Structure formats: structure tokens, C-alpha cells
Amino acid sequence: MNNNKHKKSNILVLFWIMLVVLLTILIYTYENNLLLKFESKNSILKTEYDKLKTDTDEIKYKINAILALEKLDKIAKEKNFTTPAEKEIVNIKE
Amino acid sequence: MIRKNIFTFQQNKNDTAVTGRKIFLLSCLLFIFFIIIARAFYFQVFKFADTEKRADSTVNKEIIEKPKRGDILDRNGNILAMSVKKYSLFLDGKNINDTAKITKILNDAGIQLSKKQMTEINKKNRNIKITDDLDEISVEKIKENKKFLIGHEYKLTYRYVRLYPETKMLSHVLGRVNSDGKGIEGIEKTCDNHLTGNSLKISAKEIGGINKKRIYTETPNENSYYGKTVTLTIDKKIQFIAEQELQEGLKKNKAKHAVAIVQDPHSGEILAMVSLPNYNPGKKIKDISVLRNYAISGTLEPGSTFKIIALAGVLEEHLFKPTDRIDCMNGKMEIYKNVVISDHEKQKVISLARVMEVSSNIGTAKIALALGEDRFYKYIKIFGFDSKTGIELNGEENGVLKPTKTWSGRSLHTISFGQEILTTPLQTVNSFSAIANNGLLLKPQIIKSIDCVQQSTQPVSIRRAVSEDTAFEIRKILKGVVDKGTGAGAKIEGYTAGGKTGTAQKIDKTTGKYSKKHYVSSFCGMIPAMEPKLVILVLFDEPQGDYYASSVAAPVFAKIAQRTMQYLNIPKDEIGVKKNKE
């Protein structure tokens, strides 16, 4: 009887050890998957960021090209703008 | 008892059998489990390196990320040059079966296929270049279409294209890049190391079949490999003012070249540098002669603007005072082997200050004689002539000054009024800046900072050219040139100005003698006259018709000065000065 009990408790211990090992492997695999998921999300965000950055650069260039002084001067001349009189100039501090 | 025992024995025997079967089953399960664990352990520990290598080779990739070239900004942060990502689209004709589908997809993205491209697709050619000017929006439209397979039917590559929003403005200073994106002129060349970033290898995983997905496993900081931003001392608006006025002057006087430089005399910073004719750095250059930046490499005889050197020398050496009288010999003086120097306006005995006001060659030659060859040569070198200023631009010239031992009997006279010597416009403006800066010669600077790190927090002093008192006296005399002398065309409303005109004959290359048709007209001045905030040089090479600096260069100086002072909101220092009229 005692022998049986002893054998039972040994098997039970082995069972728990195996369970712990299994759980460890499960957690490790889960973490690896999670890492891959995050890398994938990170990658998507990086691609989105690169895209937005390129868009920003394009817009920056277009704005600067539109506001090129030569173009503004040409428009001013076409619309017959004149330099304001000194008294009409108001300086605004930035 | 025995029956009970037999029965108990039977019961015990049954229990043992059940327990035994249980143990056997559990042992089998454990054994299988053990095999799995052992196998996993074997691959994970002993075969790890091998397995990882095989997985890596199929999935893990190293992507080379091209660096973006840094921007070039003006002193106020306005963009002068920048790089934008552009995509090139290539089709693989071999993998395209439905041409109509492809045409529709590309049309939706704004791309029209030419007849030649359609022919190549039908011929099943590979790597057919469709366009190399795609922006991000068009690329997104193409990628969105799942029926169009990247890596199979088409591929996209990208590069950074250099763009200049102000087109021709500041072209000689900015320079340009070649087709590989390497700087070959101007700041693009000088700062190429800073502007060019470093290619970076980034780890990524590529998974999937035809429609591959890329997963980056690291995201490096772009500051670590993108090119740096270069900020110039140039003010975009002052540059525009100078270019516009100079362009008008060039057109009006039909000159061959024109130069304008605006400098802050107290820091040496160049606020504007114009060399005309200019070019568009973003387009192909047909005539390479336009690439030359005359402001730093145009070596010309400076003419009368050079007279301030002899003036500075005699005042510094206390040989003359501004009120001392000099006999200008009624406009003609024989100097050496029947060589006669003359003045355009006959003068008799006048003060030293008046010599400068009327720009008398004879008066200047006489004061240079008093100074002597060695001392005069010393002052020429002290003011930075015959050596590079060290500005951060390529192609700067030294100028030409013969050593005194090779001077003829007339050299001292002629060099004193700016002949027999070659200087660059930058050297001239920098020497005037020394006068404006109380006698301290500074290094001209055009780079303010690289990636927000100051190149130099203080002005770079080269040497003391003359004392503060001498510089003050010279400024008074130069003010007189504008108030009562040849520089009257440089008068500005509301501001005092001082400066010197220069009308120099050019050597006729065919005869080797001074030409009567070709001149260099220049005016270099400072505003306000006594406490200058700006020094401006304007120069026209071979103006047609009228060539006198007083009517060609001085008025352009006045216009640039007037507009710049108003833009910078510098308070007026003289009310009641007649407005300069054309």
C-alpha cells in the first residue's frame, strides 16, 4: 500500500514537472509569435511613416515652389501691386 | 475468514491490475512526451545554428536603405535645396498576360503607356522602364490594386531627386549635383560629406509567395544615416532684391557679366551673393561658362575702388591727413618713359579727401609714392588681396599681384588706382568691410551652421588692417565721395552712405593694350556711412554705352541698399537726403 502511494506521488510529481515544461514551451512560443506580430505592426507603421514623410517633403517642395519670390514678384506685377508708402507699413514683431 | 480473505485477495488483485494499467498508460504517454521533448531539445540546442541558418536564408533579408540628402536652408530656415523621393516603375513583360488590365491600372494611377512601351510589353520584354517620376500617391494607387502583382508583374525602385524651389536664384552658391547625387559645384560640393548620408543595412523578414510582405525587425533613427542640414548665412529676400536689381542693371547696360555682394561687416557673413548670368541647377546646362561664379573667381582690374588701399596706408602711417593739400597737376602727370597718367576731371591743388571724392588718379599716385613700394605692397597684402579669403566655396581665385622686385617704374602709380593688379569682387567687398568694421579684417562666411551646430559662434578675425581712428577717417572720406563726389549716384533716401566708384579699362586681348571700349564699372559702399550695417559691392563687366561707375553701378547699389535697409528695418540716420533718381 505504501509502495503504491509512493509510486503514485512520484508519477504525480513527474506529471507536474512535464506540465511546467509544457507551459514554458507554450509561453516561449507565444512570446515569439507576439514578437513577430509587433514586428509586423512596427513594419506597417514604418512604411506608413516613410510614406507620410515623402508626402510631407513633396508638399514642402510644392509650397516653397509656389511661394518662390520670383513667382510672387511676377504675380504682384501682373496685378499692378505697388510698394506701400512708408507710413502704411506696420511692422509686427514675431 | 478464509472466504473473506480469498475475496479480499481477489479484490486486491483487481485493484492492482487497474492501477497497473493506469501506470502503463501514463508511462506510454510520458514516453511519447519525452520523445517529443527530447527531439525538440535536440533541434533547439544541438541543431539550433543549422536550423536558424536555413530559416534565415529563406526569410531574413538585409535591406539597403538609401540615405536622403540633407537640405540647404537660408539663415531664416527657408528651403533653398531639398531632396524628394521619386519612384521608377518597371514592368516585366514576360509575366504580363492581360495588357488591358495593366493599362487600366496604370491609367487610374495617372500613367499613360506610350506606343513603344506597349510594343515592348507585347514582345514580352523584361525590365521595361515606364516612368521614373512617380510620387508616393501614384505608388500607393498602384500597390492598392491586388490584381497587380509586385515583384512579379512590376517592380518599383526609388531614388532621391534634388530640387531647388527658387530655380535660378543663388545658383552659383548652391551649386548642383550630378546624376549620382554627388555635389559637383558650390555648397553642394563643399559640404558634400555632410549633405550625403550613409547607406544603412536594415534587417527585415520577407514572407509570403508572390505578394511578398516585408517585416522590418529594426527601425533605426534617420538622424543616424540621413544627410545633415546646411544653413547658409544668405538671406533669401536680400538675395532676391540683389538679383532683381542686378538683373535690371545687366539688361539696361547690356553688360557681359554682373556681380553683387552684400556683407555684414561686423560678422563677415555674406547675406547675398549674385553672379550673372546664372542658371537653373535642376536642369541640364548647355553653356558651361555660366557655371563660373564671378563673385569669387572673376579676376579683374578693380579700378578706382582700389584707391582706398593707398589712402589707408598713408593715413595709418601718418604721412598725410585728410586736409593735406596735393597738387593734381591739372589732370596730367608724366611718370615713366613718357607714360602719362591723367584724370577724367582736371584738378589743381586739392585736399586728400577731395582727391578721393573726385577720384583723381594723379593724387592717388602721389600718395602711393609717398608710401613707397614696400609699404604699399604690405598694405595690399594686409587687406587680403593676392590671397584667398577662405570662404567655404570651391573655385575661389587668389587674384594676381606681382612681387615688388618685378615692378616697373610705373607699377606703383598704376597699381595705386587699380591697374596692373587683378582682384576678385569678394576681396574688394571684404576690404571695405574691414574699414566698416573699425579696421578689423574678417573672414567672409557663407555657412552658418550644419545640422543646427554652429560652425563658428563668433566672427573669424584674420588680422587688424588699420587702426580704429584710420578706419573712421576713411569712412568720413568715403561719405564725402557720395555726398559731394563721383558717388552721388549712390545716395539713398533717409540714409547716409559712403563708398567708392571704380571705372577700370580692360586689356584688349588682341592688342595687349588698354581698351577704349571695354570697361569694368563698380561701386563698393557701406550704409549707414559712419556706423555701417551693410557693405555692398555692385560690378558690371563690359557695360555698353555709358560705362562710368557713377551712372552704371552706383544707382544699382543705391536701389539694393534702399530695399535691403527697409527690409531689415534699420532706422534711418539722415532725413532730407534727396531721393536717388535714375
Image (cartoon, coloured by chain):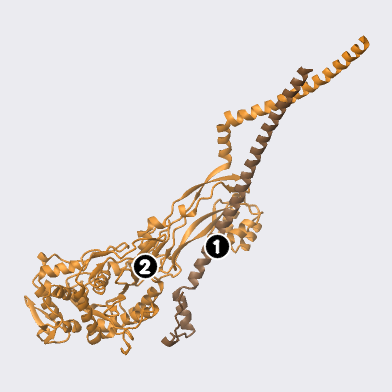
Chain colours: A brown, B orange
Chain letter belonging to callout 1: A
Q: Is residue B214 visible?
A: yes
Residue B496 lies, in percent from the top left, at 29, 83
Q: Which mark is residue A55?
A: 1
Q: Is residue B504 visible?
A: no
Task: Examine the rendered structure and indicate whether residue B219 appears above or below residue B383.
Answer: above
Amino acid at circle 2:
Thr
* Marks 2 and 1 close (CB-CB < 8 Å): no
Furthest toward the front, the residue is B1
Q: Tell me how far mark 2 sits from mark 1, CA to CA.
A: 29 Å
Q: Left of B569 or right of it: where is B106?
A: right
Q: Left of B561 or right of it: where is B462?
A: left
| Residue topped by disc 2 | B233
Residue A47 lies, in percent from the top left, at 57, 54
Amino acid at circle 1:
Asp
Furthest toward the left, the residue is B337
Give the quarter of the image for residue B34.
top right
Which residue is rendered at x = 62% and y = 29% of the image?
B41
Residue B102 lies, in percent from the top left, at 63, 57
Query: Between B554 and B545, which is closer to the camera in this rendering?
Result: B554
Q: Nearer the viewer, mark 2 or mark 1?
A: 2
Task: Examine the rendered structure and indicate whether residue B378 appears above or below residue B516.
Answer: above
Give the quarter of the image for residue B6.
top right
Provide the secondary structure element on which disc 1 rests.
Answer: helix
Residue A43 lies, in percent from the top left, at 58, 51
